[in-house]
Amino acid sequence: MDAILVLNAGSSSLKFQIFAASGQELTRQIKGQVDGIGQRPRLRAFDAGRKPLVDLAFQKEEVPDLPSAIDKAGAWLQSLEGFHLMAIGHRVVHGGPDYAAPTVIDQPLLDKLATYAELAPLHQPNNLLPIRLAMGINPAVPQIACFDTAFHRHHPALADCYALPLALHQEGVRRYGFHGLSYEYVSERLRETFPDRAAGRVIIAHLGSGASMCALLNGQSMESTMGFTALDGLPMGTRPGQLDPGVVLHLIMQKGMPAEAVSKLLYHEAGLKGLSGISNDMRDLLESDDPRATFAIDHFVYRCALNIGALTAALGGLDALVFTAGIGENAPELRHRITDRAAWLGAKLDTAANDAGAPLISTPGSRISLHVIPTDEELMIARHTFRLIAPAH
């Protein structure tokens, strides 16, 4: 059968999915990942009915890095029979100022995307590595880059611009926004399930190890909490979120920290991990009775509520708030606490529905509707990839 392979490569995991393409329909056939890279590597995959297809644990020296994880996953994928690979779709976090739509990858594009690595050092190099490897293995298979920044590239100019000299903006120093593939998928699902709300003023809260929020009007991104890089906005697992740039100047000029050390601090040692001194994983913090864990959670909730207020102002009001991603989908306590702080907007939570993770978690009397919609970035990538290459088949 004709198939689309989707690869989503991160720093400690490689996610992959295979979708069968028939007519205009995509059907998920296989979903898997290699996680625990360099620590407790494990390759797992399931078919569409959640039947296990493979479950292999490795010694950490067998899979110490992403290239070795790609090698293990690739060997297993190549052993599969019955699939004719039409194309490979990739999540690429940063598309810079030039790429606002999914694009067929060639060497010049790959070289250009590599220049954005400093803007997304946790993601961009890892996103590009499997593309390079696949090019070497089978250059005849089209590869498609799907950008997390693309969904936000049609922001109003006022939202896109920093108060810096215009020449810097023209060079690409501007607010991009991220998690766009997730926002695009969730906004489409909201339109399918609650079309009246999707046509209005919506905030989607993508809350996970990486966290951000997006303000949408009739399904279009109008504002986002992330900006030039994925450091801005909400506190995250290891990233600080909104930060006075004077702090960076202080670290460099007063404390004498080299740029590399500051980068390591901001990308790897801040956020929930830095605040709590315990963990970057919200699940660990919720299970802990350490007051530092409590403080980190309180800070996360406070900053979420603060940004809901700012995005509501950008939209001129609010009709719906949607929770998605790891924390947003799986932590009812966090949803409860965040919506309590949004009570001034008329948010009223249905506690039973929230505890069950129902699609609608607001009461009938709530002025704004509250939703939980699981994200599916890989399906969004598959759709973009199929639309782009379908005319050629």
Image (spheres, rainbow, N blue to C red):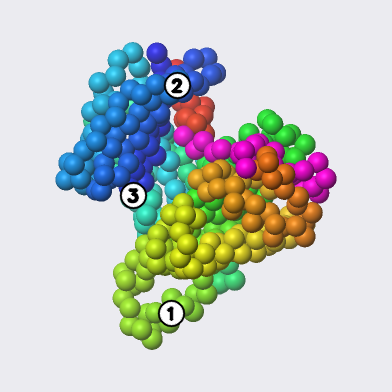
Q: Quadrant of residue 110?
A: top left
Mark sitting earlier along the chain (1/2):
2
Q: Which residue is mark 1?
A: 249
Cα separation, mark 3 vs mark 2, equals: 26 Å
Q: Is residue 152 visible?
A: no
Mark 2 nearby-residue class (10 Å; few <14, some 14–19, many ≥20)? few
Q: Is residue 373 magenta?
A: yes
Decide: marks 1, 3 in contact (CB < 8 A)? no
Q: CA distance from mark 1 to mark 3?
A: 28 Å
Frontmost residue, 293 versus 385: 293
Disc 1 and disc 2: Cα gap in Å? 51 Å
For badge 3, the amino acid type reads Ser
Q: Which residue does the image show at 16% across and 45% down from the upper left?
A: 61
Q: Residue at x 51, y 71 (%)?
A: 243
Please, what is the dominant secondary structure of the magenta stretch? loop
**Where are the magenta residues, as a range?**
355-378
- What residue is pinned by disc 2? 48
* Residue at mark 3: 11
Give the mark nearer the N terminus: 3 vs 2.
Answer: 3
Q: Residue furthest front?
A: 289
Q: Secondary structure at mark 2?
A: loop
Tell whether label 2 touches label 1 (CB within 8 Å): no
